[in-house]
Structures are given as structure tokens and as C-alpha cells.
Image: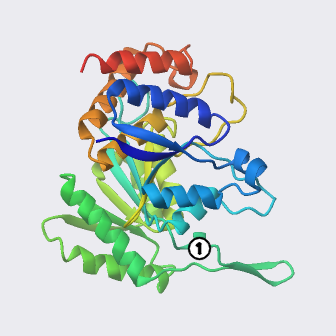
Amino acid sequence: MITPVVLIPGDGIGPEVTASMCEVLRAGGARVSWVEACAGLDAVERFSDPLPAATLDLARRYRVALKGPCTTPVGKGFRSINVRMRQELALYASVRPVQSLPAVKVPYNHVDLVVVRENTEGLYSGQEHFVVPGVVESLRIITRGACERIVRYAFELARHGGRRRVTFCHKAEVMPLSDGLFLETARAVADDYPFLEFEEIPVDKLCMQLALDPTRYDVLVMENLFGDVLSDLCAGLVGGLGLVPGANIGARYAVFEAVHGSAPDIAGKGLANPIALIRSAAMMLEHIGQRDVARRIETSVRRTLESGLGLTRDLGGEGNTATLTERLIANLAGD
């Protein structure tokens, strides 16, 4: 069965890494057909909107999308593409697997954790206004329903993924009502999973502990702003955003994405590293039941990094997007 998937190439280096990803998935035997949609700077030029209604309609129709990096024009009145997409499609769970990879020079080995971030509320709800000139008030929205939904998602991910511990991150001692509600809800959900370990930790302490020893953590779950910061911090533990995949999951729709920027300074030069989008595509394949292809792609990424051949400059090599794509395809054949 061939599954249609909405493909949003994005802008900047987006079209280049998207083309590489399509080649790798084709070589790996992925059973997908692409339905291309538009977002980012190109969409502003064509539709006067970085996230056109037609793109959202396609995502709703086909339910699964894969998105390259997109630029939201700053200072022109547009809201973040990512925030809008998550709220429009109720993509309440941001899922960021963070794993050590071969031959990537970082201070830590054996990191294997997942950051689960509530994606629709908190300070990113977009509820802010001027109180008086020179004073802005931003509302941090926390609801019991969204808290329970994201914490339960984290526990279910741990249960089905063979993981042992869920760590809830908060700042309830400073925000006793909002984070207090979140913490209270997390404890109640944890009670339904007595076979999994549960711990709670303030966000500042968690940052320190991740810097000291990230290998002790398994599944981290938290609210929106904390998750935005910590998911990038955790990506840095294993080599950066160019290597880490990402997904945004809802009850009905799912959007998988490279979480790095559009890097306009190298756009069109063939220098971009496509691994983050390729690994996000592997997550997408697993989501739609094509686990065999997803596993082959992940294995190829590890073989390619270990070999050191054809790597882009950000990975310590002298290659480019084309050479890295060639090596990834060649390493599929050895599976």
C-alpha cells in the first residue's frame, strides 16, 4: 500500500534537504507518494501568508505531513508558522528523540532520551497585550485537560517503547497555581502506571543535571516554553539540531519536521546537512507502519557517520549535500 504524505519543502536550505530526503526514501523502498504543499517565504510571495489555508487543508485531508525548515518573516505581523500549525491541527505533543550517534564528537556517550513537550498552551498561546504604554502582559495558559493529555502521552510512549522512567519538569515553587496544577495532574497520571518510575524535578535543576550526566534520563515531559529550550539543549548533547529528528503529534494529525533553521546563508550552495530531515522522515515511516524502511534508514545514518565518508562540513567532513546523500544511499544496500 502506498501512503500519500503532504510534503512541505520550506525555504532556505529546505528544498535541498527535502530533495536529498526524497532520494534516500526512494532508495530505501519507502511506500509513499508526495503531495506537495507550500509554506514559508515562497508562500508569502504567492499567497501573502506563510502558512496558507490550502496547506492546512491538505494536512487535514491526508493527516500526515513532513516539513522542511520554513522562515516566518519577522516584524511583518505574521505569527510563527510552527506555532500556528500546531494549534490549527491540535498537534499537542512535540516529540524529540535524542540519541548518541557514532563518531560524533561530543562530551557524552550513551545518551538515549526523549523530550516530550506540550505544544499548544503555556506562554506560546499567543495571549498578550499592552496594559499601558511600555507595559506588555503575556498570559501563560495551563489547563488540566492539556496537562493530563501530554503526561499520559509520555507514559504511553515509555510503556510501548520499553523505557523505564518518566521525569516531569516544572517550576511549581515559583508558579504554584499554573505549574502546581501541572504537577498535581502529572502525579495523578503517574499513579495509573505503577510499573514505570516517575520523578519530578525543577527546570533549573534539570538543566544542571543534564549538563552533568544526561545518560540517567529516559523520557522527559514538560510544558511548552521549558520544552522549547530543553529540547534544543538536549540536541546539543548529541551533536546539534542538524542530527536530531522531530515530530508533532495530535489525536488526528501528525507533522514530522527538521527542527533546525532555514540557514539562508548557505541556501543554494549544496552544503546543507539533510540528516535531521531524513531521520524525521524515518519517524514518519514508523508512524505509518513502515518500520522496516525506517530501521534501514536509521542504520544507514549510523553507518555513514561511522565511516566518515562524504560528510558535510558541519559534521567534520569536506563533502556536501550530494556526497552525503550518495553515502546514505550506498549504506542502505548493506542492510
Q: Position of residue 263 (x, y in %)?
A: 66, 36
The three-letter code of the residue at mark 1 reads Ser
Q: Is residue 333 left or right of residue 192?
A: right
Which residue carries the number 1 mark?
A: 125
Q: Is residue 235 left or right of residue 68?
A: left
Q: Is residue 307 visible?
A: yes
Q: Quadrant of the N terminus?
A: top left
- The extreme left residue here reads 195
Q: Is residue 102 visible?
A: no
- The extreme right residue here reads 133
Vertical placement of residue 161 versus 136, above or below: above
Q: Quadrant of the C terminus?
A: top left
Query: Which residue is depicted at the point 33% across and 81% down?
Result: 185
Figure quadrant of residue 105: top left
Q: Position of residue 246 (x, y in %)?
A: 44, 48
Query: Which residue is depicted at the point 49% across and 80% down?
Result: 142
Q: Is residue 232 left or right of residue 53?
A: left
Q: Position of residue 103 (x, y in %)?
A: 38, 23
Q: Secondary structure at mark 1?
A: helix
Disc 1 packing (10 Å; few <14; some 14–19; many ≥20): some
Query: Which residue is depicted at the point 62% across and 43% down?
Result: 10
